[in-house]
Amino acid sequence: MSLKRRDSKNRVLRVGEQQRSDGRYLYTYKGGDDKKHYVYSWTLEKTDKTPVGKRADLSLREKEKQIKKDIEDGVAYHGGDVTVMELVKKYINTRTGVKKSTKLGYRTVTRCLEKEGFSHKVISEIKRSDAKEFLIYLQNEKRKSYSTIHTIRGVLRPAFKMALDDDLIRKNPFDFPLADVIYDDSVKREGISREDEKRFLDFIEHDSHYSRYYEGMYILFNTGLRISEFCGLTLNDLDMVKKEIRVTHQLQRVGDMAYEIVTPKTDAGCRILPMTDEVYECFRRILKKRTMKKVKVEPLLTDEFGKIYTGFLYLDKNDMPKVALHWEKYFQFSVAKFNKLYKRQLPTITPHIARHTYCTKQARKNMNPKVLQYLMGHSGIEITLDGYTHLKFEDAKNEVERLKANEQ
């Protein structure tokens, strides 16, 4: 008759269980991969007290119960020993057909994760508290910005969702609101006041140097176009008879300085915008200057489907289309020049702030939010409504008084 193994408290140990010389319990089992796996705990039963100085954890038999349940349910308890980094790379490999800018974002995320010990952990061992602690660590210790962490979590969450769907894990540890864990330290970009917009555009229109960019800046302030959409406009996108702007694509220059024509991320980005008389006049002057410019070779760019784009409105000294960076610098330098000349300073103004300003202006005019959503090319109304949050007390006061007057 064989003797049953017992622990230091004389309790009978089951098959696969043993107690090591330091008092720690060990359970050995074979997973779906037919390899031996090991789990440890300082306690055998749930009612046992954790030894002083040791980290509290599930008891060995609680872990055994979970392992058996996972095996019955077809869940690989150890995630096939897949690490976070391996999971992320596998997820990225499944993301075929994404835009070049998205691929560059994936590369940035993997480079960041590769430097962290967290990426070498086995996915099945990561709890929600571990995921939260990692994001907090990125913000507090590594000084990563909110937008960077948002991007990293934007890869980790769907990657763990894939592992969940593949029955490698039971829960997604990254499935929680980011705002519950870290604070948003990003600078809120709001539109400027109507007065500041007028002062800025008046200055640009009459400045000996920056007046050459007046039409483009005016259009950005009065159409809500994204700067990449504006840079991508060609002669074929303007209907000067119907006074319409057809927005179907964007022009970007990615990390390797290559030009790229991309389609909007959502169908909402494709739209037709009406021209006001002032916007029409600006386009008319742009086209007139365009015909006077002697272009040696008209630039030709193709999108991912092979469609050719030519006749861009603004070209640089090398006869290549101007991109967002050009306009960002024009705004930056012109504001700096204004602030050197005048005591009453202008705030920071960028092409994106011009877009925000347009949205806020239309909100102040009580434009139907769904119409404004269409004009802005927003995929969801909640994004458009953010423009209404930029309104001030005076706007609220005027609206209350307007409604009151309508009742009388």
Image: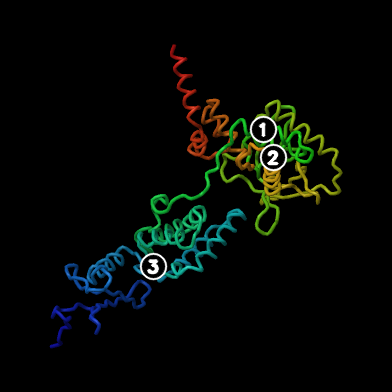
Left-right relation of 98 to 59 = right
Closer to us: mark 3 or mark 1? Answer: 1
Report if the CB atoms under discs 2 and 1 are less than 8 Å apart. Answer: yes
- Say which amino acid is labelled 2: Phe
Residue corresponding to mark 1: 199
Q: State the mark number for residue 398.
A: none
Coordinates of residue 62 in the picture (x, y in percent): 23, 67
Q: Secondary structure at mark 1?
A: helix
Image quarter (top left, top right, bottom left or bottom right) of the C terminus: top left
Q: Residues within 10 Å of mark 2 (few under 14, many from 20)?
A: some
- Pointer 3: what residue? 79
What residue appears at the point 52 percent right and 60 percent down from the top-left corner?
A: 94
Dot 2 or dot 1, earlier in sequence: 1
Give the residue drawn at x 86%, y 48%: 296
Identity of the residue furthest to the bottom in this view: 1
Three-letter code for the amino acid on which mark 1 is drawn: Arg
Image x and y of residue 340, in percent? 69, 42
